[in-house]
Image: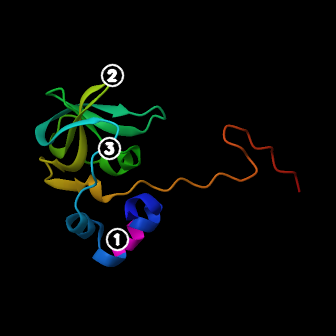
Amino acid sequence: MLNQHLPALVRTCALLLVCGSASACAATFGPPPPPADVEHTATSIVTAQIASYTANARGLMDGVVLDDGTRVHFRPHMGTTLSPLLLRGDRIRVSGWEMDRPGVGRILEAKMITNLRTNTSVDVAAFADPTPPPRPPSVPPGAIAPPEPAR
C-alpha cells in the first residue's frame, strides 16, 4: 500500500500533484486511520475551552488539555503551525479519534481543529510527518560523530 512503502515527503508531493492542494487530498483520500497501538473507541467531536498545553519529551507542543478534561493530541511537528490558533482560554472544536492509551487515559487524536473565536480551522490530518534527516552512514545510532579536521 502507498502509505507503507513511500517516505512521507514523497507521498505528500504525489498527493499534491494529483489533488492540487493538501485540503483537496484530505477530502479525496479521507483522514488517516487511527494509530494502531491504541484501543479505538470512536470518532468524536468535542467543543471546549483550552485550559493548558502538553509537550513531548523534547519540549515540542503536541497537544492541549481542555476545560472538560479532554486531552487533545496532534503530532509535534504541527505545534508551531497550531500554536497561534490555540490560545489559552479560547473555545475550540476538535474532531478526531477518541482512544484510550494505556497509562494515559482518554485522548482525542486531532483530525480537524477549529478556533471558534477566530473561526479558523486547520485540517491536521492533511499534514504528513516530516521525513527525518538521514543519519550519516559512518556514525552508528547513539554514537557521537568525531569532529571534522581543521582546514
Q: Tell me what residue is drawn at x 53 percent, y 53 percent.
A: 132
Which-is-in-front pick, marks 1 and 3?
A: 3
Q: Which residue is mark 2?
A: 103
Quadrant, the C terminus:
bottom right
Please give the residue where the numbered disc 3 appears in the rendered image. 35
Q: Is residue 151 above or below residue 27?
A: above
Above or below residue 150? Residue 90 is: above
Q: Position of residue 108 (x, y in %)?
A: 22, 38
Mark nearer the N terminus (1 vs 2): 1
What's the residue at 12%, 39% (across, down)? Answer: 46
**Foreground: 107 or 88?**
107
Name the residue furthest top: 103
The disc labelled 1 sits on which kind of residue?
Answer: Leu
Q: Is residue 110 left or right of residue 140?
A: left
Q: Amino acid at mark 3?
A: Pro
Residue that mark 1 sits on: 15
Foreground residue among 70 and 51: 70
Of labels 3 and 2, earlier in sequence is 3
Q: Residue at x 29, y 66 (%)?
A: 22
| In magenta segment, residue 84 | no
Image quarter of residue 100: top left
The reply to whether residue 46 is in sight is yes
Where disc 3 sits, the SS reads loop
Crowding at label 1, few (<14), some or many (≥20) Cα neighbours within 10 Å? some
Sequence-first disc among 1 and 3: 1
Magenta range is 12-16
